[in-house]
Amino acid sequence: MYHNKKYRVSKLEFVGNAEEDYDYFEKIYDFIYKLTGKKPSLKIRKQKGGKAIRLIFYNKQFVQKLNSMGLPLGKKTFTIKVPESMLDRGKMKLIIRGIFQADGCLYFSRSKKCKYPTYPRLEIKSSSPVLVSQLKSFLEKERFKVYAKKSSSDRTFGIYLNGEKMLEKWKSLIGFSSLKNKSKYDFWKAKGFYIPHTPLNQRLKCTDGEVANALDF
């Protein structure tokens, strides 16, 4: 989220993976359009790692409204936190779902009983120690078994939840907002294992299209 006083430019910008995040970006696009009556810019560009999707919305009033709610402008990597006004249980569940969509990952570890990974793990990474503390505190109050540690390779902190019980609890209480993570869950649920690096379109085929139902957005 950005504002340049000199040129009087305010914008909201999202960047993601075009293959994995396209359905989620469409929802953001529709949400902003319904809320403001104005259409954001949504474009896909090729880059070295694949295709990136970028949504940009130029609107001073919208940016100012978000800023007044406690969301900071400019660089916020190491200082971002959930505003005090949004720390209640209902809002926090939605906020954590959104943070997981942006900075979280559902993956699976390999066990000795199967050549493919079967053991589920949830991870959220952030460079803000305050945000990590807020998320960990909330999840612990909800009776999640949470592990947090600082990365030895960079300046990030990680939150980890391990095992089938924690994944099912997450699915029930927090939920998934996009096909990216929901399709991984459904693939694992249907097969009993997960094959790493399976493209989204293949994950959807493996679950017979049932993934598209019951997305929590």
Image (spheres, rainbow, N blue to C red):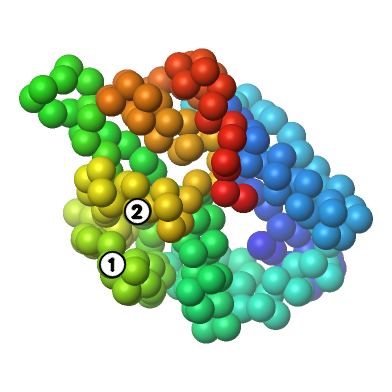
Lateral position of residue 14 relative to residue 61, left or right: left
Query: Dot 1: what SS?
Result: loop
Lateral position of residue 153 relative to residue 124, left or right: left
Give, as a three-letter code, the residue at label 2: Lys
Q: Quadrant of the N terminus?
A: bottom right
Between disc 2 and disc 1, whose residue precedes?
Answer: 1
Query: Dot 2: what SS?
Result: helix
Say above or below: 195 vs 8.
Answer: above
Question: Residue drawn 74% across and 34% down?
Answer: 43
Q: Visible in this render: residue 126?
A: yes
Q: Nearer the viewer, residue 88 or 123?
A: 88
What percent of the width, then of the height, locates residue 66? 70, 71
**Residue at which label 1 appears:** 143
Q: Nearer the viewer, residue 108 or 171?
A: 171
Q: Are marks 2 and 1 in contact (CB under 8 Å)?
A: yes
Question: Residue drawn 50% across and 78% down?
Answer: 87
**Residue at which label 2 appears:** 169
User: Label 2, label 1: how many angstroms apart (C-alpha)?
Assistant: 9 Å
10 Å neighbourhood of mark 2: few (<14), some, or many (≥20)?
Answer: some
What percent of the width, then of the height, locates residue 102? 50, 49
Question: Residue drawn 28% across and 67% down?
Answer: 143
